[in-house]
Image: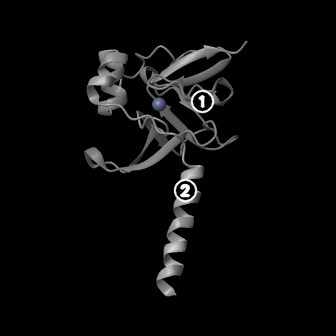
């Protein structure tokens, strides 16, 4: 009886998690290299960081949506974008459940890495020094991880 119950619990947990989980896009490194530019590949798949003030969306404030450069999942809207002065596009919130958060202790720093929840591509990091009037969060994102589309 006990075994049956735990099996049932496992099954229930499995069902619930598969319903809530998004459909993942999984590709090999060779497949990613075919669809991404070398610079995009470095950021998204090798967790690279573009130089500050180098990205095309740093000082860019058109109205629209920012999609994952790897898989086209909508990640941020222009409404959540603000000028942090950091040299990277900054947002104070993300769209839906489309961004993943991961502990990152590389380079002796305690940071939280942000990834696209659909393709697991690296986007940037989140810091808690964002605008106090809204969320207080600063999503510090590489321009190369994003593709902007103007709203109609
Ligand atoms: Zn993606």
Q: How many marks?
A: 2
Q: Earlier in the sequence, mark 1 or mark 2?
A: 2
- Name the spot of residue 98 as percent of width and height, x first: 56, 38
Label 1 vs label 2: CA separation? 24 Å
Is 152 in front, or is 125?
152
Crowd band around label 2 with a 10 angstrom C-alpha radius: few (<14), some (14–19), many (20+): few
- Residue 36 in sight in this render: no
- Name the spot of residue 67 as percent of width and height, x first: 55, 24
State which mark lies toward you, 1 or 2: 2
Residue 109 vs 94, above or below: the answer is: below
Q: Which residue is mark 1?
A: 76
Give the SS element for disc 2: helix
Residue 151 vs 93, above or below: the answer is: above
Is 35 in front, or is 123?
35
Q: Is residue 150 left or right of residue 72?
A: right
Res 39 quadrant in image: top left
Residue in view at x 42 percent, y 20 percent = 144
Give the SS element for disc 1: strand
- Which residue is most to the right? 152
- Name the spot of residue 152 as percent of width and height, x first: 73, 12
Q: Which residue is mark 2?
A: 17
Q: In the rendering, which numbered label is found on residue 143?
A: none
- Residue 88 in sight in this render: yes
- Name the spot of residue 128 as percent of width and height, x first: 53, 46
């Amino acid at each position: 009886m006990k075994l049956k119950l735990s099996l049932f619990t496992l099954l229930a947990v499995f069902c619930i998690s598969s319903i809530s989980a998004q459909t993942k896009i999984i590709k090999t490194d060779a497949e990613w290299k075919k669809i991404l530019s070398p610079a995009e590949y470095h950021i998204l798949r090798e967790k690279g960081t573009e130089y500050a003030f180098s990205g095309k969306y740093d000082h860019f404030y058109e109205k629209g949506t920012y999609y994952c450069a790897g898989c086209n999942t909508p990640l941020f809207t222009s409404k959540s974008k603000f000028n942090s002065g950091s040299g990277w596009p900054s947002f104070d919130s993300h769209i839906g459940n489309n961004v993943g958060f991961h502990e990152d202790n590389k380079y002796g720093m305690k940071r939280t890495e942000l990834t696209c929840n659909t393709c697991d591509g690296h986007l940037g990091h989140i810091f808690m020094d964002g605008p106090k009037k809204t969320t207080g969060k600063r999503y510090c994102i590489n321009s190369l991880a994003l593709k902007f589309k103007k709203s109609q």
